[in-house]
Amino acid sequence: MNQIKQVRENDFLVCAQPGLTRSQLNEHIRRFGMFFPVDPGADATLGGMAATNASGTTTVKYGVMRDQIADLEVVLSNGTIIHTGNLAKKSASGLHLNGLFVGSEGILGCITELTLQVHGIPEYIVSSRANFPNIKDATEAVISIMQAGIPIARVELVDEVSIKQINRQNNTSFPITPTLFMEFHGNKLGLQQDVEFMKEIVEDHNCQEIVFESDHVKRRKLWEARHQLAYAYIHGHPGKKMMVTDVCVPISELGNAILFAREQLNETELSGGILGHVGDGNFHVLLMIDARDPHELKVANTYNEKLVMYALEKGGTCTGEHGVGVGKIKYQEQEHQEAYRLMQQLKHTLDPNNILNPGKLISI
Ligand SMILES: Cc1cc2nc3c(=O)[nH]c(=O)nc-3n(C[C@H](O)[C@H](O)[C@H](O)COP(=O)(O)OP(=O)(O)OC[C@H]3O[C@@H](n4cnc5c(N)ncnc54)[C@H](O)[C@@H]3O)c2cc1C
């Protein structure tokens, strides 16, 4: 089920089957001057991305998977086929079933067709790399850039430990400081002014160096370090496996949350680095562990749990984008409290025989 059923270019809508991957979709709609922005790194399927409410580096501008869904065709557990939305840009009718089924990890129904919002390819793109003396300055600079209304489309923080790992692995010599990788989407004249304004903003936050690139090849090169981060860790730790944490906090709490994550990590014997989707308040700690060593596994799980508790205390969530699956069911009650009861009732109503992904997301 990987076919594109319809492209409504004047409505910026594409109807596709759930097995189509996001790269296949983008390949097809490029000819219409359009693109689909959600990029979870891997070349995931649209059905899987909708089921997990995927997001990625462009979320700061374009939103998460839930924001891109106009309509879903869903087969319910009793075989009924429903449509959760419509083709209109907005609607005040009925309950928001798109929102209910997106992120439900397949426990409420099976998505058999998706109608997605797509976007015009921006006329001009500028990428940037900026170095800061510490994480707090870097995250606060991002808040100021967003407050200034600069059209930031990607903003990723890589901590100094990870920059060191990248340099070691790739033979590069990036300054070993917390680094922001950014991308701006807009038109040429507007972005040239934004670049000047941004230089002033980051200087106010003690930025040590900032570089900009608009050439396609140079932009790709600039982002290479960020994109190769996971590989740099994996290749640098032969025999170890990567475990990735995924909490998300209010943006204003992100700087402190990352500092907490680093302090706690330093108290363990584990090695790892921190990567943040700064515009969303979501960050990952990439932990390199020996999965056959029960002690290391226990230390990593305890560490993960500390981060989850910290995020919940700050009004955040146990998973920003990777989903609940089976591993994070244990935090659902604490995170959602009374609303969790309602979720259990919804699951029971829509799937009374518990045949759809039993044991995932919600325990009943
Ligand atoms: C290393 C790593 C990094 C990741 N990084 C990110 C990231 O940066 N951002 C992010 O958002 N996510 C991330 N993820 C999670 C990723 O988004 C999801 O795994 C992915 O979007 C799911 O797509 P898939 O095609 O792999 O789906 P699958 O893994 O096949 O399915 C995922 C879930 O959706 C259900 N499902 C699949 N298709 C349907 C359907 N048609 N109807 C109903 N339910 C369905 C499945 O039963 C399963 O529960 C990461 C995962 C890994 C392993």
Image: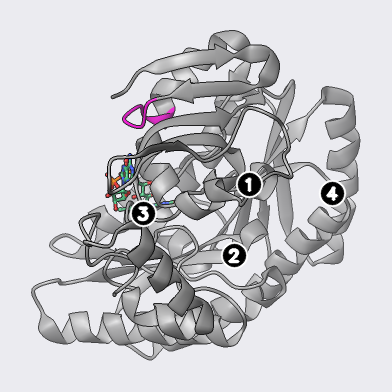
Residue pointed to by mark 3: 108
Secondary structure under tag 2 reads loop
Circle 3 SS class: loop
Q: Which residue is mark 2?
A: 178
Q: Quadrant of the C terminus?
A: bottom left
Which residue is at the far left?
292
Cα distance between the residues tagged 4 and 2 = 18 Å
Q: Residues within 10 Å of mark 1 (few under 14, many from 20)?
A: some
Percent x, y of residue 363 = 29, 74
Question: Residue 14 placed where, x, y %?
Answer: 53, 22
Kindly indicate the quadrant of the structure image that contains residue 281: bottom right
Instruction: Mark 3 vs mark 1: give the one in front.
Output: 3
Q: How is the image coloured?
A: one colour
The residues bearing labels 4 and 3 have C-alpha atoms spaced at a distance of 45 Å
Of residues 30 and 341, which is closer to you in this image? 341
The answer to which of marks 1 and 4 sits earlier in the sequence is: 1
**Res 53 visible:** no
Q: Amino acid at mark 3?
A: Leu
Q: Amino acid at mark 2?
A: Pro
Q: Secondary structure at mark 4?
A: helix
Residue 73 belongs to the span the image colors magenta: no
Q: Which residues are magenta?
A: 17-22
Which of the two discs, 2 and 3, labels the residue nearer the N terminus? 3
Is ligand 1 closer than 8 angstroms to the Cβ of mark 4? Answer: no
Q: CA distance from mark 3 to mark 1?
A: 23 Å
Q: CA distance from mark 2 to mark 1?
A: 25 Å
Indicate which disc, 3 or 1, sits on the residue closer to the N terminus: 1
In the image, which disc is placed on residue 198? 4
